[in-house]
């Protein structure tokens, strides 16, 4: 646990400059009530097929999650993210996980590594490459992980973090994304609509 905490702190400090650059490159996060930008843009999935956010849309809603392989925050949350994503798919909420990182910054974020990770973790939802980082910039996403949840009508109803404790799942008190997914799958509006995304800065492609 001490090692994980140290990794999180070191990565957060190391990524501060990149995160600030990402903030300037992005337009700012899309507002609650917005529709998904660039929803028809085709992205390469780990199964080799091309699909879009629109293709991943579920009957009850759609979760767009910006993530990667290398980030310690992603790694700490990953089992919970996969469980939430798989459960959301079963509940009628479509899920698409997007890697917008430049693999030249971290080789672990390359496509082959994505394929391996998806298999190892049992992801039942698409994990796609944002080859220009254009999708992340259009969303105003700057962190990994960062969640954007849309309702059945395509309106953004939640954006932000996964829960309130990346380091220790046993100490989680607020399951923000899980609560939002459960609300959307029941046709309701999440009680918490925005939280601060906590994670590594997206390493935007240039």
Image (cartoon, grey):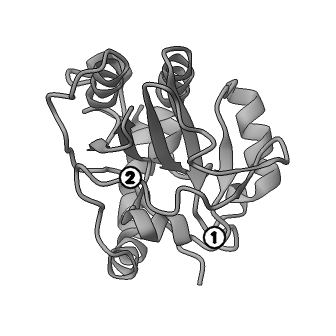
Q: Is residue 3 visible in the rendered structure shown here?
A: no
Q: Residue furthest front?
A: 153
Which quadrant holds the C terminus?
bottom right
Q: Are marks 1 and 2 in contact (CB under 8 Å)?
A: no
Residue ID for mark 2: 199
Which quadrant holds the N terminus?
top left
Asked whether 32 or 17 is in front, the reply is 32
Label 2 environment density (alpha carbons within 10 Å; few <14, some 14–19, many ≥20): many
Asked whether 63 or 202 is in front, the reply is 63
Name the side, left or right, on which 197 lies relative to 136.
Answer: left
Q: Between disc 1 and disc 2, whose residue precedes?
A: 1
Determine the image quadrant of residue 105: bottom right
Q: Which mark is residue 87?
A: none
In the rendered image of this protein, does residue 93 appear above or below residue 43? Answer: above
Determine the image quadrant of residue 24: bottom left
Q: Residue at x 48, y 44 (%)?
A: 64
């Amino acid at each position: 646990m001490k090692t994980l905490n140290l990794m999180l702190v070191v990565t957060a400090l190391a990524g501060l400059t990149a995160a600030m650059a990402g903030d300037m490159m992005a337009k700012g996060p899309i507002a609650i009530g917005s529709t998904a930008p660039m929803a028809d843009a085709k992205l390469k999935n780990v199964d080799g097929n091309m699909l879009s956010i629109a293709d991943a849309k579920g009957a009850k809603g759609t979760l767009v999650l910006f993530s990667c392989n290398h980030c310690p925050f992603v790694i700490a949350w990953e089992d919970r993210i996969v469980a939430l994503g798989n459960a959301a798919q079963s509940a009628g909420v479509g899920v698409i996980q997007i890697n917008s990182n430049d693999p030249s910054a971290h080789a672990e974020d390359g496509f082959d590594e994505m394929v391996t990770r998806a298999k190892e973790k049992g992801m039942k939802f698409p994990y796609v490459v944002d080859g220009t980082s254009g999708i992340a910039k259009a969303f105003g996403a700057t962190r990994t992980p960062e969640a954007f949840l849309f309702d059945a009508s395509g309106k953004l109803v939640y954006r932000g973090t996964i829960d309130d404790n990346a380091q220790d799942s046993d100490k989680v008190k607020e399951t923000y994304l899980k609560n939002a997914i459960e609300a959307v799958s029941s046709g309701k509006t999440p009680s918490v609509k925005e939280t601060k995304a906590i994670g590594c800065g997206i390493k935007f492609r240039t």
